[in-house]
Each structure stands twice: as structure tokens, then as C-alpha cells.
Image: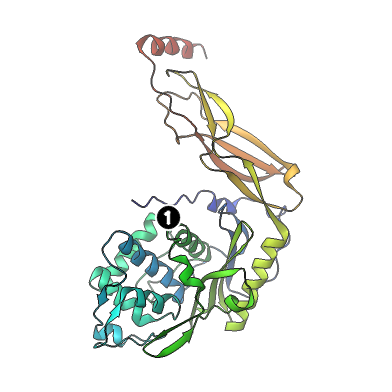
Amino acid sequence: MRLPVFLLVFFCAALSHAQILPQAPTVAAKSWLLLDYSTGQALASYNPDERVEPASLTKLMTAYVVLAALKEGKLKPDQQVPVSERAWKTQGSRMFIEPNRPVTVDELLRGMIVQSGNDACVALAEAVAGSEEAFAQLMNREAQRLGLKATRFANATGLSDPQHYSTARELGALAAALIRDYPEHYPLYAQREYTYNRITQANRNRLLWLDPTVDGIKTGHTESAGYCLIASAKRGPRRLLSVVMGTASDGMRTQESQKLLNFGFQFFDAVTLYAKEQAVSQLRVWKGAQNIVKAGFLDDFTLSLPKGTAEKLKANLVSQQPLMAPVHKGQRIATLKLTLDDKPYGEYPVVALETVPVAGMIGRAWDTIRLWFE
């Protein structure tokens, strides 16, 4: 079962801490975003919520849905897929599949991811859902589940359509979800070229040649969308993603993406504030089998901070009182409010680290009386 994406930290980028952050570089793009993959923080952005045409970045969601079908056993990597006339004649970039030539799901995946083949997308869509239209419905269902409220898909390829749109912020969230949920398939995005039907095509992500720390993820281009690129780089334990939309050329999207990634690694540090299941505090519980519950984070709580500012960070825990039993492990019971240089930096959910069942009748009655006097 695939769990919903938790996007709360990601959207904390909207908080007003712009004056605290290092000055971001000038980026020649319609909209852009620099995202810390582990923390979900937007380190810098410009028009990240402006509606944009995703072009072939659409294929990230196409891949997400196809990989889900593989994981659920609805498709097999070596399964042969019939090539319809519609898939064969699809416009735009192609991997050059043919109606009378057998092609497997694995070959189509590489044709879609490495070669950006629109024909591969349609063939995969038809294999999963019977038609591209039905597949687009699956794409929109996944977008909704992932919390992508400003995104809508009309096709599997990214060809222009008035009802096909997204934002830099949500495309970044989609890319992060793909890396997280399907790590075994993510290395396909680092493949520099692929040969099918005796035709070799190079990956259009030029950063794969220019920066050895870049290992994906996808380019996009139409006349109306301009040149777009989501790139991901891992240096040491840290992974950053850049989203650049609507640049003027292939070279420009490469240059501006590199600029953003370098900025993020040079000017920010990843700081672990609390270890996994470390108690941030202990909170009072009413009508429970015990009257105290440990509060903290189920995973390491790590943030990206401007270099040299960690000592200036202050935390304030705001609990939800009265907290009544039962309390379940993982239940949100407080909020950690952070300030940096006395300016708001973020608010993050704090959860129960243990389960507290309901007390017996006498215990509940006693706490009821005590609450009258609180």
C-alpha cells in the first residue's frame, strides 16, 4: 500500500523568512524552485505557484503511475505491449516503436525516461488503462493523493492542452515523490543514452555530462512552455532538486539549473535538530492509563539552514491541551515553532512517540473532577 505524501514541511516555504535566507542568484526562467529533498524545504524560489505548462515533465507522473502498476503486479517488465496506431503516430519526441515490432514494458520505460518518447508514453498508458484518456484519469487521481492541488493532466505525454498544467512547486514535489517511492527505478534517470530499433538517442539532461553529482531527473520543452528541467544532485548525504520552467534555450535551462544546485550546496547546511524518536518534551495526558506521553519525531528531524546560523535557531513547543486519552503513537499532539534571528522560520508537527490507552473508570472519573478545576 502506497502511503500519502506528507507535504506540510514542503509548504512551509510560504513562511516569511526571506530576509534570513542568503540572496538567491538571478535565474533566467519564468518560474523556478530549489528544493531540499530530505527536509522538503524550498530554499529559494521565484513564482513557484504560478501556473505553468509542464511539457515533458508530465512524464514524471506517467512514470509514477506505470511504476505503481509494476509494483502492484498489473504489469511485468518483460511483458510485451502491442503498439497501437495512435501510439505509433504520436507527435513530438519518439523512441520509434512500430506496430509490428514487439516491445516490452522495460524497453518502453527506457524509451520514455531516457529518450522522452511520446510514443512510449501512449503505449504504456494503453497497457495500464486501456486508453490514454483513462490513464490521464489515473494521473489526476495520483496527483490528488499526493496533494498536488494546482496540477491537472490531460494526457500522458505533456503535449500542450488548456487543461494540462502544474506549478514549479508541485512538479518539485512530484519529482521528490518519484525518487522516494520508487528508488529501485530512479537510476534509469541517470542513463545517458538508450538504443532502440537501432536508433541511439541521448538523454536531454545535459547536466548528466557536466556535473558528476547530478543523477536525474527530466527535461521538457514545447514552444509555449519553453525549455524546462528538473535536476537532482547528491553531494555527500544531501540531495537537492532544482526546478526551472520556461527558459529560452536548452543551454539556458542547463546553466540556470546548475547555478541553483551550486547555490544550495554552498550556502546551506543540513542540521539534525532531533534524532529519531528522541523526546522533545513530555506532555500531560488526561484520562489515560499514564499521565505523561513522550512527544517528538518518528524520523530524524533535519532542516536546511543558512551556513553558520544553527546557533541562532530557537524552538518553542506549543501543545494541544487538554490532551485526552487514548493517544496513539504517531498522532499529532503539538507544534514546534522555530525562529531564526527572532524571525519565524517554520512550524512543524510533533507527534506522540508512544501509545497511551484510556484509563479505567476510576482514573477517568478522577481526571474529570480535576479538569473542572483546571
Q: How many marks?
A: 1
Q: Nearer the viewer, residue 187 or 232?
A: 187
Q: Is residue 24 left or right of residue 332?
A: right
Amino acid type at circle 1 is: Gly
Q: Using the rendered view, name the quadrant where residue 21 is placed.
A: bottom right
Q: Residue 89: x and y, percent?
A: 30, 88
For image coordinates 48% across by 21% down, the residue present is 285
Quadrant of residue 275 within the rendered picture: top right
Q: Residue placed at 56% from the left, 25% from the top?
A: 282
Q: Are there few (<14), some (14-19), or many (20+) residues within 10 Å of tag 1?
A: some
Q: Residue at x 54, y 31 (%)?
A: 295
Farthest residue toward the front? Answer: 78
Return the residue nearer the eye: 204 or 9. 204
| Residue 231 rendering spot, x and y as whole percentages | 56, 70
Q: Position of residue 260 (x, y in %)?
A: 65, 68
Rendered location of residue 314, percent (x, y): 70, 39
State whether residue 159 is above or below residue 38.
below
Residue 127 in sight here: yes
- Between 135 and 73, the one lying in front of the other is 73
Q: Quadrant of residue 55?
A: bottom left
Q: Is residue 54 visible?
A: no
Residue bearing mark 1: 147
Extreme residue in the bottom direction: 198
- Secondary structure type for disc 1: loop
Q: Nearer the viewer, residue 199 or 268?
A: 199
Q: Is residue 152 above or below residue 278?
A: below
**According to the image, what is the colour scheme of the structure?**
rainbow
Going by the image, does 341 lie left or right of 38?
A: right
